[in-house]
Image (spheres, helix red, strand yellow):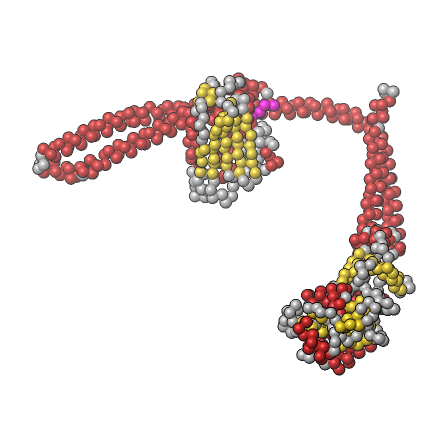
Amino acid sequence: MASFLPKVRQYLPVGLTLLTGIGFTILTTTALKQLEQNRMAMEHSRYVEIITASLQAKINQKLAAPVSLATLIASAKTLDAWQFQEFSRELLRRDQGISDLGWIQYVTHDQRATYEATYGPIVEHLPNNRIIPARKQANYFPTTQIESNRQPPGATIGLNWGQATVYRQALANAHGSGLMSTTGMVKHPNRPAEFTAFIPVLKSGHQPDREIRGFVNAVFQFRGFMQEVMTQIDTDGHDLQILRQDAANQDFWLAWTAKNQQLNFQHQETPNLQSVCPQIRFCRSQVRIGTETWQVLIPPSDKSQQLPQTFQQQLWLIRGLGLGITIILATYMAITIRQHRKIQQLVGVKTDQAAQLKQTLNELQATQTQLVQSAKMSSLGQLVAGIAHEINNPVNFIHGNLKYMHQYSQALLELVTAYDRALPQSPDAIQAIKQSVDIDFLRADLPKLLESMQIGTNRIREIVLSLRNFSRLDEADRKSVDLHEGIESTLMILANQLKGTANQPAITVVKQYGELPTVSCYPGLLNQVLINILNNAIDALRATPHNQQPQITIQTNITANQVQIGITDNGIGIREADQASLFNPFFTTKPVGEGTGLGLSIGYKIITEQHQGQIWAESQPGQGTTFWIKIPSGQPLTNPPSERLESLSRKSDRNTTGVNPH
């Protein structure tokens, strides 16, 4: 059993290949089938839009008759009864689907008496068919003229259309919008179902809510209207169904059968649309009759839902090819798997050897680079210290003697002044000398000259002091130092890089120093970390295009026995993908030859291992970068630098030095 399991595992890829090939073939054919069904659904959706557009055009054509009557009335200053009668009868003769055409005059309560004196009383119908004078209202909508295709007409002269809710709402919509408004389907005793369209007639150039003359109303037999519309459009063999609510908010359902050109009409509950068309969004559209919106459903025919025969044959061909290729691949894998395993074992041995050699080479390269970097920094410290020492001696000599020179010059000036007082009329030779040397100017300018020399020597001494502080790079012992002095000396070293040029503005350094105690640390190594970070910040600012106010902000503070230093630039920032690799050895985003990728790595080791502190970066691309350094203010340090450099030369997995990957 123990020997059988390795053989099974050996041929496991063959089984996985068979399963993968069969599964992929099934998924591919299923996806192709789904794509074809989606294509058919989209094609059906185009049919739906075409049929719906044709249906809407025919409905608009049917409604054009009352609209033309309203246009005629609007163009006439007064309504001529004979013109209305003749035009209406012609429209009724042409369109048998219209039951009534009438003119409804808009009458306010103040105008009622005048209207009734001209046209007769305004009345309303009670449920028992009694006719009574219209009850008092703010506005009335009486029938003033009417022509009908039926006897008796659906309305009488003077009938107030505003008495019924269904008509009052449609009239209000037409009045408020100035557009045609229709009722839902209305059923009357002993009459087929019908709907009424109201077309407002406005006084020319006025707003509809204030200057309306009246309405043209047209009553349509619903079944006849829709039957005539449907027979005039080509549904391309598709059945068509329409859902709407009537005036009593009851659902009614129209079904047009393309085969026998019949329109079935019935009241019923809202049908399950998903059962009519499984992909309802490809079957549904809308048409409008005036202000009413009707849902139109055109389900696909049985024939159109079947996949084409050619496509089904292609699916079977794909299935056969997929299974055949899968079997061939599985057979090939079974034949070659033993040889492959032997080759894999040989490759594994060689790969391990190559990996070990590569690791050794990387360790040697890292150690060499670190030693060169350390040697450079140590030589720089010695060079700076030597230069500072050589400059310091003569400067101190000059600075120390300026005091005595000032005293001697004052004594000589006092002597000259005493001679002037004792001999106001000095010999001509002396007067000539006094005029040639301008003794008054010398007496005023000499103290200023000595004061300028004093200021200059003080500045040189400050620079020398900064150089001496920075020269701590080669110090190996731990010392208690003022971190601000180290920062200032580093800034002095970088002063030339901070200056502006013809193409780039100067970089402003903002110092936000807090009250810090002296800190026990390796000052030379801390200076190395600071100069690396500041150099990176300068490079980032110089690489930021159109930055007219480059700035570096240095913050220091102390919290919970931890001294914290923050160095912020407003440069281009660091990409989020690069931030995780900032402190990795040899990582840099600078062009080849401009960065070694070691500065930040060495700084990380100096802070975390030799000072038991923390260093991290916060950056937003386009908004700048902040590097934070946090070290203990009084805890003992570990790993002296000399021992650490020896360790760096032996362990390639602790490479440290880098360049800010701005």
Q: Most extreme residue toward the right, as rendered?
A: 260
The image quadrant that residue 333 belongs to is top right
For the N terminus, the quadrant is top right
- The residue drawn where x is 66% and y is 69% is 208
> From which residue to which does the magenta span run?
653-658
Residue visible at 31% across and 32% down? 455
Q: Position of residue 73 (x, y in %)?
A: 71, 76
Picture residue at 12% right of the left edge, 34% below the top: 420
Is residue 548 visible to the viewer in this orientation of the structure?
yes
Left or right: 547, with 15 as reference point: left
Q: Nearer the viewer, residue 387 or 51?
A: 51
Q: Quadrant of residue 4?
A: top right
Question: 8 and 214: which one is in front?
Answer: 214
Quadrant occupied by the C terminus: top right
Q: Nearer the viewer, residue 618 or 39?
A: 618
| Label tally | 0
Q: Position of residue 656 (x, y in %)?
A: 56, 26
Residue appearing at x 40%, y 24% in the figure: 468
446 part of magenta stretch: no
- Specify whether residue 656 is painted magenta: yes
- Whether residue 373 is visible: no
